[in-house]
Each structure stands twice: as C-alpha cells, then as structure tokens.
Amino acid sequence: MGVAVTDVQSKLGFRHFHAFLLFSINVVTFMFRNSISSALVAMTDGTKEDSFDWSIKTQSVILSSFMWIYVITQFPGGEMAVRFQPKPLTIITTVVCTLMSIATPIAAKIGGWTMVLVCRMIQGAVQGWLLPCVHVFISKWVPLEERSRLGVFMYSGAQLGISIQYLISGYIIHNWGWEAIFYINGVIGAVLAGLFCIFGASSPQTSKWISEGERLYIQTSLNEIARHKKLKTPWKKIWTSMGFISLIVVNCAQNWGVWTLMTLIPSYLNQVQGVDIKANGVISAIPYLGMFIMSFVFGYGADLMIKRKWFSITMTRKICNSIGFFVPGLALIVLSYAPADPNLAVLLLTAVVTPNAGHFSGYLLAHIDMAPNFAGPMSGVTNGCANVLSIFAPLAAGLLLQDEADPRDWRKVFYLSSCIYIACNIFYIIYGDSTRQSWNEPETDDTDAEAEESRNKVH
C-alpha cells in the first residue's frame, strides 16, 4: 500500500484537474465581478451614439451594488455548502452569473441603469456562496501534504480573473463594443458550468472519475476513512475560540486593505501622481498579475516548510500571513511619500499588492487546518464580517480626505490602513491557531453508541 500511495502522491491525478476546474471558476467569477468597472467607461462615453447619460453618482451606485447582497449571503453560505454540498451551489453560482452577464447589455438598453443594478445584485448574491464552497472543496479534496499549493492555486484564480479582465477589456471594446465583454464572459462561464456539472464532485467519495488509489490516498491523508455524516455546527465552541476570533480580525484587516487599494489607489495615482490607472489596462493588471505569481511561491514554500518540518503548521501560516500584511503595510507608507513619478508609483503599488499573496497560505487556509468539517461555515462568518467592515473603508477615507490633491491627506489614509494591517496581524500572531480543534470531531451521543453496540452484536 505504501508504494501505491507514494506512486499516487508523486503523479498528477484527478484531484489536480478538479482543482483546476475550481481555479477556472474563480477566474471567471472575478471576471464577472470586475467586468462592469471596465465596461462603464465605454458605456457612458458621450462621444458614442449608444452611450448612456449616467451621472458619476449613478455609476458609483452600480459599482457598489454587487456588494449589497454579497455581504449578506456570506453568512449562510458556509452552512449551505455543508448541508446541500458545495457542487450544486458552485454550479448555481456559475450559471446564474453567466445568465446575468449575458442579460446585462439587454437590461441596460431596455431598463436603463436600474436593470443593470438588478443584474449586479443577483450576481453578488450567488457569489457570496463561492468562497465557503471552495473551503469545503479544499477540506474534502486536498491531501494535507498539498494543502498550501493546491488551496492557494484555487484562491489565486481571483487575481488572475481581475488581471485578465483589465488586460482584455480595452481590446474587446475597441474591436466589438462594450457589450462583447459581457457576452464573452458569459460564454466562458457556460463552458465551465458544463464541465463542472460533468466532472465536479463534492468529495472524492462521490466522484465517478477519480481512481480508487487516489481516493484512498486522499482519505488516508485526511483521516476520513471512517463513516461520513452531516454534522451540526458547534457555533458556541467556535465563537468562544480565540483562534476563530483571530481569523475574523485578520480577515477584516485584509478586506479593509483590499478595498482601500481597489477604491482609492486609482484616485491617488491620478490626483497626486498623474497616472490614469483606469485608462491603462496593463498598469491596472500588473499588481494583480504579480500577486497571482507570488501566490504560487507562497503555496509551494508553505508546503515545503511543513513537509520538511522546519516549522509547525501554525507557525507556517503566521509567517506567510505576516509577509502578506507587514510588507504591504510598510509599502503603503512608502507610497504615500513617493515623489510624483508614474513609474515609481506603479512599482510601489505592485510592492503593496504582490506580497499580500501571503494571506492565501496564511489565515485563509487556517480555517481548514482548525476544523475541516466546519471550514465552510467558519469562512462564511469571517468573510461576511470582513465584507461588512470593508464598506466603511471608503467612508473613513472620505472623512480624512479634505483635499484629494494634497499628499498629506492621503498619508492619513495610508497610515490608517497600514496600522490596521500591522495591528491585526499582531493579534493573529498572538492568538492564531492552526492545530486541529477538538470540536471539529463529532461527539458520540447515546443513540450513536447504542447503534454501534447493536451492530457489534449482530456481527
């Protein structure tokens, strides 16, 4: 058996193809999410005959509408992924987002901005389930020895999706018009939904494509050869765990930083540095491409540290997360003092975004380390709380920015984000825990004990 397991472990298997499908779904769902940012510029271009006369305020409402229900569906998303299995929820997410993408150009022409708003809200609602589903997939499909690199691979689809959308949108709009962005994304989404219907599975036990040897390897690694049953989430024990509380804190810091970068950095570069980042897809994509590439460095590095026993799993997660938070925190401060040089500004922006890939191998995987049986519900809560808090990042910046062209006001914004990054990661360093929690395992009640005793008597 040892030779067989070693043979399976050393080769590419169906688990890798399954991970690739989930990676691809993450790519296209983030293309869906980011598509409106690129398309709105062309949709509201007054020099074109088919443009829409939407004010900046209306455009801002459209851009924010995705998050309105997305924030809410994060919370039940984890429980749904466990109770109803992640495969059907992932398919529903991809199909609904595909339909809404294809419908967006038609909705804009028939119902104006309000119908576009509805399409975006529906996409946000179903995408709220996706991250908890990915956590559940990782907990069921990925052997412990490969958790960092395969887990990070699936997560990193988000950054590649953002980069691809930035890179191709200008070309698509120039050649086929803004409507083509939504139609092309819809075609990609439809293909992936079909592939996942055929090849996807909630767990290796329910897959008809995986070999018996590979299934045994995954089960043995995860210690899941024993019986399987749906478990009741021990919310009281979860909420009284400081390890879990630390995940909420550090996830909130991550989202604060991300939304500061996504919503405010373009304005800073334009007002202070003279860089129109929204008009240059390549410049917009560089930081996220860097983050995508760096995620693999962290993934393989984390697995190597764990495999060679250089550090414990908990320490490995904290090292990766610290690089992902401390470096961007310091780089934000440096960026705020940078002279007016567009090239230097883009370089520093890349230095802020790229190292943040460490959080993929950091706190995100800690959900699964702590309690693989409840990784979905846990991630739904932590990401839900983080997305609620992220709403306040632009509001806080608005209070600090009296003059958008004044670098001194921007320093206040960057210092605040930097302090949040650093302080919250210190909290995670102190309280974070990636050891398997006792409440992850189901408690054997009297009914189970009696049933087990009866089976033993029969046999």
Image (cartoon, rainbow, N blue to C red):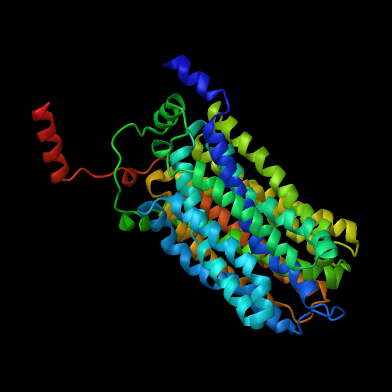
Q: Quadrant of residue 273?
A: bottom right
Residue 210, percent from left and from top = 47, 32
Up the image or down, 275 lies above or below 370; here it is below
**Residue located farthest toward the top when viewing the structure as drawn:** 3
Q: Is residue 353 visible?
A: yes
- Residue 256 versus residue 327: which sits nearer the camera? 256
Residue 46, percent from left and from top = 84, 81
The quadrant of the picture occupied by the N terminus is: top left
Residue 26, percent from left and from top = 60, 52
The quadrant of the picture occupied by the C terminus is: top left
Residue 246, percent from left and from top = 48, 55
In this picture, residue 176 sits left or right of residue 184: right
In this picture, residue 264 sits left or right of residue 173: left
Up the image or down, 108 lies above or below 2; here it is below
- Residue 285 versus residue 272: which sits nearer the camera? 285
Q: Residue at x 74, y 85 (%)?
A: 55
Q: Is residue 434 visible?
A: no
Q: Quadrant of residue 405?
A: bottom right
Up the image or down, 421 lies above or below 134; here it is below
In this picture, residue 310 sits left or right of residue 324: left
Q: Residue at x 89, y 57 (%)?
A: 343
Q: Residue at x 37, y 32 (%)?
A: 223
Up the image or down, 385 lies above or below 372; here it is below
Q: How many marks?
A: 0
